[in-house]
Amino acid sequence: MLAERHHRHLLALLMLALALVLAFLTASEAAADRPRFDTAMVRLDRGDGTILTFDVEIAQTPRQWSFGLMHVPSMPAGQGMLFVFPDMAPRSFWMKNTVIPLDMLFFDDEGALVSAIGNVPPHSLESRRSAGNARFVLELNGGTMDARGIKGAARLLLPKNDGW
């Protein structure tokens, strides 16, 4: 009886170890498949004339758009990702393989804020949509909008001759 209980505990521990190894290998494989992103410093008027800067990765190809911040285990404060699309259209995102909460800010082609969604939970399959047509989407760590005072009148300050 004692030996049988010991074997069940040992089997449970082995199954847990196998699950952890598989999770690690899957995450490692996903990280290895991550596309290369250019980086840039973007400026944002938070809505009251105060200018904030963020060091971002630029997602401007279909592969980069589909990968985004998936499998990124953490992101330092002041960093993010800027999705750059070729046209104005409704934008929709989900968080299936994203492991950190994010704020999503949707901007039109002039840099005006269309809509924003704060603290989107990780791993969610719920579609998060812009309230209107957008060309740019800035993803920041969850809570950044509140912590940095980003308001509804925020503007993405686009550099001239940026090729976007």
Image (cartoon, helix red, strand yellow):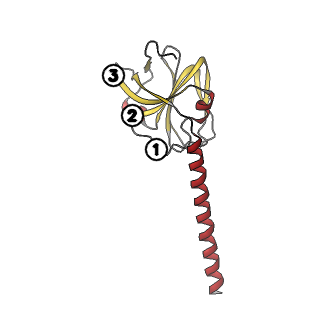
Alpha carbon distance from label 2 to label 1: 12 Å
Residue beneath the point at 62% across and 22% down: 90
Three-letter code, disc 1 = Ser
Helix, strand or loop status at disc 3: loop
Q: Is residue 153 visible?
A: no
Q: Residue 73 in the image: state x and y as whole percent.
A: 49, 46
User: Which quadrant of the figure has residue 14?
Assistant: bottom right
Instruction: Tell which circle, 2 or 3, labels the residue nearer the N-terminal end.
Output: 3
Q: Could you say which is closer to the camera, residue 48 or residue 81?
A: 81
Q: Which residue is mark 2?
A: 78
**Left or right of 146 in this view: 23:** right
Query: Which quarter of the figure is the N terminus placed in?
Result: bottom right
Q: How many residues crowd around disc 3 within 10 Å: few (fewer than 14), some, or many (20 or more)?
A: few
Three-letter code, disc 3 = Thr
Q: Which residue is mark 3?
A: 50
Three-letter code, disc 2 = Gly
Residue 74 shows which numbered tag? 1
Instruction: Tell which circle, 1 or 3, labels the residue nearer the N-terminal end.
Output: 3
